[in-house]
Amino acid sequence: MAAWMLSEASCPQTSASPSWGSIFHPSRAPVNIADVATSLMKGVLSYGPRFFELEWCHFCRERHTPPEAAPVFRLPLDLGLRIVSFLPFSDRSALNASCRHLEKFVTNPVAARVRHTLREFGLDPGPFLESMQYHGAVIGGIAALRIFVEDVPMPRVLEVYTRQGHPDLGAPNQEEYDDDDPSADRGNGYRLVETAIFTYGKCQLLGYQHYGANVEKILRMRNSTLDREILFVQSRVPPIELIIEAPTTLLMNFITSNDAVCLYPDLTERRKGLLTLPIPDDRSSTLDVPVLDTLAGFRLYMFGNATQAVGRHRCPLHPSCPAVPRAYPDLLMYTVRFTDAGGYGSRLAESTWTLKVPSPCGSTERIEQST
């Protein structure tokens, strides 16, 4: 049985973390951190004088009570950011949309993680993101996953998916270079070390076999000084269609020039993923999928059975149910717009799909009633 194959019984149940109430006041009943966060958020729009007496806000261009009316604004910024980090993705999305003054609590951490990731690969975030927008490129793989699952370590390889060409890596460290010379500096110390055009080579670089048919070629760039690699995955289909062919929903995340997108937020925030690989009847896998072992090493759990991953639900009403037809963009995904950089506009094509899983949930599944 492969390391990444889990049953419902083998997935450890997440125990409730010690709450602030139980830590500081052991004799009192535990306090739910989400309730604390919700209480601190109240007051921005709901309380205060009547509407026509409210002061006009030039920042968000509407009338509302002063931001200081919300308890969260009376806290140090780093503490407010920490509190919001305990909220589920759905609450963060609602918070982000409710008031422009609250956007920073959601967008600032995401923007910081995106820029930190690019700098770790020796890239200047501003120009690189703008070049990504021009080429309609997205960042996928482990680098995109760690934007939403913060304890996932920084990967050594950055996967960039693009339809034509690839984003500019920046100025080369030498004044002149020859495009035909693989050893020449292509920008910021990156040199072309491999061009994979056959299915086996593509699968070896990506860690799984799904992309062979839709990938035209992969350019493997290496920076020996930083010990980092960038894979430019040039696709025959729009990049989003490559993302949704990943072997698990845990890898169905991506970073555009302006947004960080998680396609299956309910599963991802619970550290669960649905497998999209065909699994034989004996529950053993005949496919070499090293990326799934990598994810299992991060304490992420993957299931071939949809009900085990999603839980008992009514098909196809649950947002993570594989029977739900999905589209990009739609309201079921978790999207954080971290910058408005670039003047080329969105060049990402819309996509639609329905997940194909080894063991789908049936329409006979019903919501489990509590007594």
Image (tube, rainbow, N blue to C red):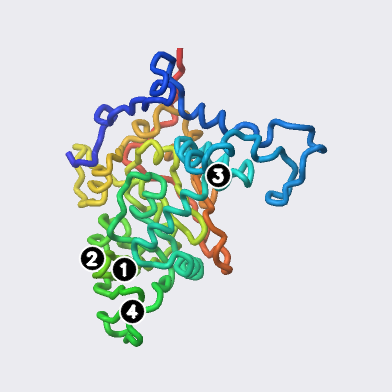
Tag shown at residue 173? 4
Q: Which residue is mark 1?
A: 218
Residue 92: give x, y in percent of width and height.
52, 40
Say if mark 2 contacts mark 1, CB within 8 Å: yes
Q: Nearer the viewer, mark 2 or mark 3?
A: 3
| Mark 2 secondary-structure assignment | helix
**Nearer-N-terminus badge (4/3):** 4
Mark 1 packing: few (<14 Cα in 10 Å), some, or many (20+)? many
Is 262 in front, or is 112? 112
Q: Which residue is mark 3?
A: 331
On the question of residue 242 being in view, the answer is no
Q: What residue is shown at x 23% (from left), y 65% (from top)?
A: 201
Q: Residue furthest left?
A: 1
Report the amino acid beneath label 3.
Leu
- Quadrant placement of the C terminus: top left
Q: Which residue is mark 2?
A: 201
Residue 127 lies left or right of residue 277; in this view the side is right
Q: What residue is shown at x 27% (from left), y 43% (from top)?
A: 298
